[in-house]
């Protein structure tokens, strides 16, 4: 084994563990931002009555892209305020951990945009997005405190629960615009709840 490579890995893991509290504080505004954007997007998709699986997939992939861009800008600003590099080796490790499940979700969304899927098959996309996102959060959680891993489990279990529900009761045969509200409540609501939890627990830690 390359001793230099091993030493670099140990130093990276040590740095990640030392900065876990810092990453936790950075997650609070990011999660809150994602929560508000998700809720607003859910209401917007329902009000606009965006129909057809391709339109549904394109709309929510656009929402995800905007949310990711704003979150990266927010994290970048926090890194500059703390006089730390934005794209540091620990950050690259986290990015590598979440890259595969997020890329899989994006690829599936693109498939729904370019292929002729039926509305009854839209449930596959929603369930897969929940599962892949849960996998990504769980992978990132190995470099942070366990709260992010628990959130990943919540997303994963939510996807499985919906899948079993549709197996028993059948998926919607037509695109129900209330699915936009479901997406907003799922992705937006869970993120907002996690952001509020982080703010409240951080305040307790500071006052303790």
Image: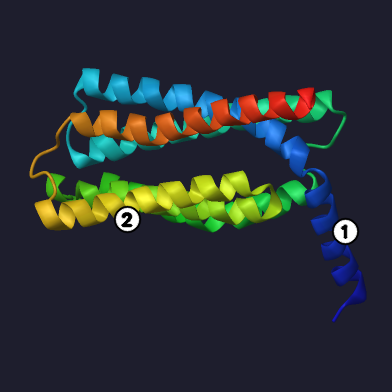
Look at the image and tell me whether residue 105 can be seen. Answer: no
Figure quadrant of the C terminus:
top right
Q: What percent of the width, then of the height, locates residue 6?
A: 86, 71
Classify 3 as above or below 62.
below
Residue at screen point 83% across, 47% down? 18
Q: What percent of the width, then of the height, locates residue 83?
A: 88, 29
Q: What percent of the width, then of the height, locates residue 115?
A: 23, 51
Q: What percent of the width, then of the height, locates residue 66?
A: 49, 29
Mark positioned earlier in the residue sequence (2 or 1): 1
- Residue denoted by label 1: 11
Q: Nearer the viewer, residue 43 or 192?
A: 192
Residue at screen point 82% across, 64% down? 9
- Residue denoted by label 2: 160
Classify 156 as above or below 6.
above
User: Which residue is outermost to the left?
Assistant: 173
Q: Quadrant of residue 178?
A: top left
């Amino acid at each position: 084994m390359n001793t230099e490579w091993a030493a670099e890995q140990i130093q990276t893991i040590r740095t990640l563990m030392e900065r876990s509290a810092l990453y936790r504080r950075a997650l609070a505004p990011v999660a809150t931002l994602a929560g508000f954007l998700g809720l607003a997007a859910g209401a917007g998709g329902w009000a606009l009555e965006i129909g057809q699986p391709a339109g549904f997939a394109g709309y929510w992939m656009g929402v995800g892209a905007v949310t990711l861009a704003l979150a990266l800008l927010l994290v970048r600003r926090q890194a500059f305020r703390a006089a730390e590099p934005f794209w540091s080796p620990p950050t690259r490790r986290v990015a590598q951990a979440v890259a595969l499940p997020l890329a899989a979700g994006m690829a599936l969304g693109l498939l729904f945009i370019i292929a002729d899927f039926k509305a009854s098959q839209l449930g596959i996309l929603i369930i897969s997005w929940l599962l892949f996102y849960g996998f990504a959060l769980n992978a990132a959680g190995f470099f942070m405190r366990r709260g992010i891993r628990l959130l990943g489990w919540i997303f994963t279990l939510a996807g499985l629960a919906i899948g079993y529900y549709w197996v028993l009761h059948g998926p919607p045969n037509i695109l129900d615009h209330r699915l936009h509200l479901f997406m907003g409540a799922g992705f937006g609501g869970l993120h907002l709840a996690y952001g509020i939890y982080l703010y409240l627990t951080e305040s307790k830690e500071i006052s303790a």
